[in-house]
Image: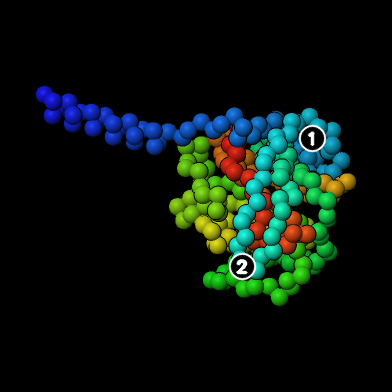
């Protein structure tokens, strides 16, 4: 009787553990992103004149973390940008995300746009020779596989089984759609997406048009500060937030 009870207890424990592993834990209240339905079109929300429409959408202030040095040659970087504000609107099958943050320097340049940029195909990336130009940038990342029950990918650009999509905007090149399957695998897709950006009174306001994402989708945000020589993995980043 004792042996049977012991075996039954082990089986029950294993079943409970398996059930818990398959059930996504509810996110802490501080990591929930509210998406507000909006009667404005996505085209309207991308315009700088849509101030009144965005004023009706509450902002969520998220904390930003500073990545540690990636190379021995990296200069120390103080945490100049500690937070960013996120506003999200749902409209006509689109998710429009506005990301704003304080940056006392506007690091941009008028570079020639690259038409029909091909996807990244190099096995190993080559160091750029233009090592004196660094630009402000921002990005929104979410899992490529949809579904609220899907496993949250690694913040280090996902992995082979849990790839991510990255809606990236650069103050010199504009919006670029990227994808990744783990650290060091980020590649251009050759596609773009609607976006707008404005620098006003020491603040960046960048608006992204994303596809409709279901409730429960994890989202993470990143900001690059050109004056601190940010590029690639050297940046500010948030932990995963969960769309509601």
Mark closer to the observer (1, 2): 2
Name the spot of residue 43 as percent of width and height, x first.
78, 43
Q: Residue at x 36, y 33 (%)?
A: 19
Colour pattern of the rendering: rainbow
Of 184 and 142, the residue lying toward us: 184
Instruction: Name the quadrant containing residue 209.
Output: top right
Q: Residue at x 39, y 37 (%)?
A: 21
Furthest residue toward bottom: 129
Q: Is residue 191 visible?
A: no
Residue bearing mark 1: 54
Measured in 3D between alpha carbons, the distance from the residue under mark 1 to the one under mark 2, in whole angstroms, is 43 Å
Name the spot of residue 160 as percent of width and height, x first.
46, 56
Of 142 and 71, the residue lying toward us: 71
In the rendered view, does 191 fall on the left or right side of 47? left
- How many numbered dots are placed on residues in this image? 2
Furthest residue toward top: 1
Furthest residue toward left: 1
Q: Is residue 66 visible?
A: yes
Quadrant location, the N terminus: top left
In the rendered view, does 52 fall on the left or right side of 141? right
**N-terminal of the two: label 1 or label 2?**
1
Quadrant location, the C terminus: top right
Q: Residue at x 60, y 35 (%)?
A: 31
Of 72 and 136, the residue lying toward us: 72
């Amino acid at each position: 009787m004792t042996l049977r009870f012991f075996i039954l207890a082990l089986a029950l424990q294993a079943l409970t553990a398996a059930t818990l592993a398959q059930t996504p834990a509810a996110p802490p209240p501080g990591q929930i992103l509210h998406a507000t339905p909006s009667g404005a079109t996505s085209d309207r929300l991308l315009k700088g004149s849509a101030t009144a429409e965005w004023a009706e959408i509450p902002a969520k202030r998220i904390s930003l973390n500073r990545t540690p040095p990636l190379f021995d040659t990296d200069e120390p970087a103080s945490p100049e940008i500690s937070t960013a504000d996120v506003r999200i609107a749902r409209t006509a099958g689109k998710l429009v995300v506005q990301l704003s943050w304080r940056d006392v320097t506007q690091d941009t340049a008028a570079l020639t746009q690259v038409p029909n940029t091909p996807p990244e195909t190099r096995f190993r990336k080559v160091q750029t020779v233009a090592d004196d130009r660094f630009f402000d940038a921002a990005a929104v990342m979410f899992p490529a596989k949809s579904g609220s029950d899907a496993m949250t990918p690694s913040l280090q650009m996902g992995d082979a089984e849990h790839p991510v999509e990255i809606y990236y905007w650069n103050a010199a090149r504009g919006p670029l759609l990227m994808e990744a399957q783990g650290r060091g695998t980020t590649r251009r897709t050759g596609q773009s997406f609607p976006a707008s950006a404005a620098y006003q009174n020491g603040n960046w306001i960048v608006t992204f048009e994303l596809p409709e994402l279901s409730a429960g989708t994890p989202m993470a945000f990143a900001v690059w500060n050109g004056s601190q020589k940010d590029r690639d993995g050297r940046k500010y980043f948030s932990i995963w937030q969960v769309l509601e």
